[in-house]
Image: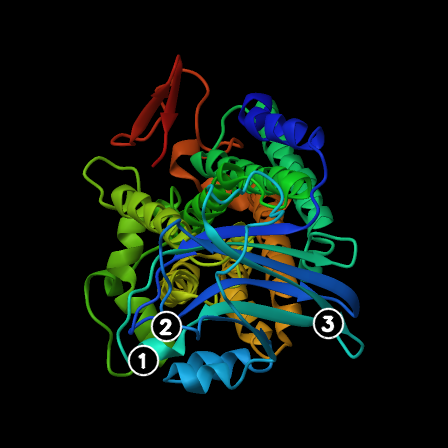
Amino acid sequence: MAPAFAPALALLAAAAVLRPAAGRVVTGSTVLTGEVTEQELCKFAYRVGRGSFKLWAWVEAGARYQSRELTAYAYLDEQWPAMLAATTCEEKVKLARWAAPVAFDGAPGDAGGAWRPPAGARAWSMRRAMTSSIRTHVWYFTLADCSLERFYHEVPAVHYRAELLDGDSHLPVDEAGLGWLHAANVAAAAAVVAWLAARARGARAVHAATLGLGGAAALDALSSLFELAHVGFYAADGVGSYAADALAAYCEAACDGVLSALVLCVAAGWTAGGHLGDDEKAGRGPLAAETLAERAASAAAPVAAALRRPLAPGSRVAAAAAAWTAAHVALAQWSRVYDDDFDVFHDFEHAPGRAVVALRVALLAVFLPVALRTQACAGGRLRRFYVLWATLGGAWLLSLPAICLVARSLPAYYRHRVVSGATAAVQTAALACLALLFTGRAGRAFREASSVAGGGEDLGLPRGGGGDDAPRGAAKLRLGPVKVRTD
């Protein structure tokens, strides 16, 4: 496990020796047009008290900004949804809490850090105290030029740098406490990996799903560890580490994909199909006299049959699971084009975030009838295992849309912390509970029924050559000298 965590540990060590920053730093460039008359610069949560906002902007030497209407605007979280819904620039800027006209008629001044406008650049700067005596607010800052909606004029590229400080902290208030959450996740997920490793070491054989759960837990731990590294760099320079934040997002997305596939395949009866007592309903459609749940379970029979042998030769389930995981990683990368400072546990308020929630709902719609089908075919002690597995798996699948739905009713400055904390805690708790169920006493009936276990007390993946009691036609993998049967 140590080599896998080495990159994040190295990032943490590098972040720890850097000098603290003066505040959060955002830099970028924009070219406004008649179609896109405003550019969102950043958002920041200020607590009750006193903070600051500094903004520098400049255009290249010789460039001329012909309009006098270029302005920096600030919006409170109460007005931001209405601002996004407004159709014209004039309607949007009326909702701003305050505005600061931008005039490129001065020298760059002290912009701080490594951000330095070139010699001869025409620049502008401002500083404003951000005070609040009622409650915490999320502030949104934009640059806009409404004249572009009325007439065409030349618009050069505008380069900007914003520096934000919440009291004496460079972190927005909605990030408070999340560092401890990531640290706790690392410890808990690493404990799950250690538990599964200890169980595998003490058993005669190991089920493939045990390896999958261990891999998902390792990805979960790496995700939080990389995020801790990002926070460490953020504390040092106010910008953070793009690489660490991206790796955190990718690891979390891969964890979701792997865990989804495991939850669904085991719920379908992976490696225990011979003990599920399928009757004649497996090969036909639902009957008119069946209840809605029975109809769904009967209709899911072909899907369940395929999921029971995901790694069998010629099976498309493994390719589908890989595509599912790749889609999650792609959505994580897509989400990085949005203004998310801590992307790994984003708020699912943008298009890729909503797509992740939609995928989870779609998977839940497949999971429920498959799980019902398996429970109906299982008997005795084996049914108890599948009921527990379906309860845990279904709760995990439902948790993300439920958390996001609840968060929408909360004030803006609570949403990020609630979504981040709840999704991270549920993810790690689900891994721990599924691992305990799969390897503990409650999972003994499943281990005994597993076809690759040969009816023994092991978990399914032989450590050695496999023996003559292995079921014929079982899919095999080879990890060095170890023969691995998966079906």
Name the residue type under label 2: Thr
Tell me the crowding category of disc 1: few under 14, some 14 to 19, or many 20 or more residues within 10 angstroms, Cα based. Answer: some
Distance from Cα at disc 2 to Cα at disc 3: 29 Å
Query: In the image, what residue occupies the spot 29% across and 73% down?
Result: 35
Relative vertical location of residue 32 with respect to residue 276 in this rendering, above or below: below
Query: In the image, what residue occupies the spot 68% across and 72% down?
Result: 137
Q: Earlier in the sequence, mark 3 or mark 1?
A: 3
Residue 48, by quadrant, is bottom right
Tell me the crowding category of disc 2: few under 14, some 14 to 19, or many 20 or more residues within 10 angstroms, Cα based. Answer: some
Tell me the quadrant of the picture where the N terminus can be found: top right
Name the residue type under label 3: Thr
Residue in the foreground of this view, choosing between 245 and 298: 245
Does any portion of residue 104 appear in the rendered image?
yes
Q: Secondary structure at mark 2?
A: loop
- For label 2, the residue is 37
> Do the numbered discs 2 and 3 sit on residues whose CB atoms are within 8 Å?
no
- For label 3, the residue is 136
Between tags 3 and 1, which lies in front? 1
Q: Position of residue 445 (x, y in %)?
A: 53, 45
Name the residue type under label 1: Glu
- For label 1, the residue is 149
Distance from Cα at disc 1 to Cα at disc 2: 7 Å
Left or right of 273, for residue 75: right
Relative vertical location of residue 255 with respect to residue 150 in this rendering, above or below: above
> Do the numbered discs 1 and 2 sit on residues whose CB atoms are within 8 Å?
yes
Q: Secondary structure at mark 3?
A: loop
Residue in the foreground of this view, choosing between 481 and 215: 215
